[in-house]
Image (spheres, helix red, strand yellow):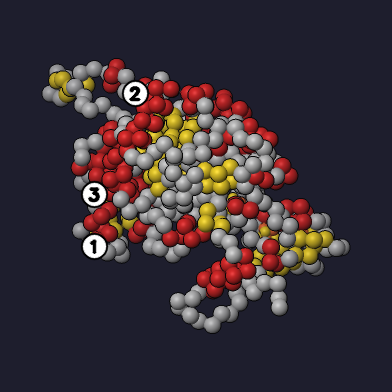
Amino acid sequence: MPQTLIQPEFKVKIDYDKCHKCGRCVQQCGWNVYSFNERPIPDDAKCRACHRCVTYCPARCITIEKNDLAFRDNDGWGPALRKSVWRQAETGGVMLTGMGNDKPYVNIFDHLVLDACQVTNPSIDPLREPMELRTYLGRKPDAVAVEPDGKGGFRLAEELAADGWLDKNIQVDTPVIFSPMSYGSVSLNVHRSLAMAAERLGTLMNTGEGGLHADLYPYADHVIVQVASGRFGVDPEYLSRGAAVEIKVGQGAKPGIGGHLPGEKINREVSETRMIPQGTDAISPAPHHDIYSIEDLRQLIYSIKEATDYKPVGVKIAAVHNVAAIASGIVRAGADYVYLDGFRGGTGAAPQIIRDHIGLPIEIAVAVVDQRLRDEGIRHQASIVAAGSIRSSADLAKIIALGADVAAIGSAALMALGCHLCQGCHTGSCSWGLTTQKPELTRRVDPEWGAERLVNLVSAWSHELQEILGALGVNAVESLRGSRERLRAIGLDEQTCKILGVKPAGM
Ligand code: SF4
Ligand code: SF4
Ligand code: SF4
């Protein structure tokens, strides 16, 4: 019998006529695909198509091809399902994976188009006129007092800042923040890159559930510190250090389940940051053991506020079927923002079956939550952060038009640092040095280089967003928020359009 019924997914091809026999491919591959015997010899079965060796081969003589084995057609049993059955029959285990849901569900973003001004309602040129991308996360005042300005119009009767609400909001200079990714699931150099970029961009990074490494203390004004069910790294000092505190209830890639960082990733620094013993598994339970109701959540929100001199507290949830009612409860419990994570959101590790079959698209979640909060008259009491595969400035503009205040990016940020979406994050062997703690791999990310690339990415999206706003004839991103009238749907069914609050194109 063969050792396995599963054939390699990829073929590694080397043009030996061009190969310098330098051995760089052997060093670069995190998954030990290559051995070297006078020339590199690949073991196809280990290749994850991360393209690290291809990128760094000086002779450009490596190609990675899909191993397109012919399977007898069967619409019900595609090759991926067959391979999964074989693998589980061999291992008896849960199939783990990394990054986001890659199943071909309808991508709603790709079925939405934005409006533009023509003739009677002039567009704005963002190169020549002011275009405001700054926004604020947190609760806004219930009402503002206005008075006549003596010129036939009105002005604010007093400075909004005098109310004190502005002190309790977090300013972001562009409506893009970085998603929670814990130190442990990603390397410290990734965290350093994110923190430096967040500071330079005037935005925020998020610790995820792994605590805050001391190297990031200088950037704390640009860091959201997270409290998850495992309470890793949480003490009063940690809570007080960040710009805001986020209670993580759920994650889009794995709604309803906990997390597990294997002991081999818990080196000395990760263990000190998480406040757990070195080499032990870091297990986050599925629920918070002190939250079984909105009242419990309210207690935790206010305990954190009391402990931090009333810093903003957000709550992160996965987008699930009754997300609107849950979000309403969260806002009424006193949260300053609700973080909605759609089912295409990334993860360091998740059971594939959960990642691919549970949750909702972020477009639907944001639309129904924004509408529910408006209907209940509490939309101003909390901001909405949207995440779960925001891939471009177009997605960014569309999710804001559907009702989000800001978008959070995780997969795109990792891609800026080299990620090739190979989905091998759970193995801890990322060739690009991102989702690993192996020193020979983590040193591949120079934080200065990483920060520069992240700043470039977000700056590029911000410029594009300004162009989109200009085309729409609005001069501030806050004017786009919830403006579904500026969206039209192409190829979406009537019910989906109704849920999104978006008209079909042509209407
Ligand atoms: S990196 Fe390229 S040139 Fe060097 S040994 Fe590998 S295949 Fe040959
Ligand atoms: S896993 Fe990545 S680095 Fe290794 S052989 Fe495949 S493409 Fe190259
Ligand atoms: S972070 Fe690394 S392991 Fe994860 S998908 Fe990207 S390249 Fe692959």
Nearest the viewer among 115 and 361 is 361
Please indicate whether residue 297 sits to the left or right of residue 54 in the image: left
Nearest the viewer among 447 and 341 is 341
Q: Residue at x 80, y 68 (%)?
A: 17
Mark 1 residue's CB less than 8 Å from ligand 3 = no
Q: Residue at x 60, y 55 (%)?
A: 424
| Residue, disc 1 | 494
Dot in front, 1 or 3? 1
Quarter occupied by residue 314: top left
Q: Residues within 10 Å of mark 1 (few under 14, many from 20)?
A: few
Mark 3 residue's CB less than 8 Å from ligand 3 = no
Of helix, strand and loop, which one carries label 2? helix
Closer to the N terminus: mark 1 or mark 3?
A: 3
Answer whether labels 3 and 2 touch (C-beta < 8 Å). no
Question: Could one spot residue 320 in this view of the protein?
Answer: yes
Question: Could one spot residue 136 in this view of the protein?
Answer: no
| Residue, disc 2 | 166
In the rendered image, the residue lying farthest to the right is: 38
Quarter occupied by residue 382: top left
Closer to the N terminus: mark 3 or mark 2?
A: 2
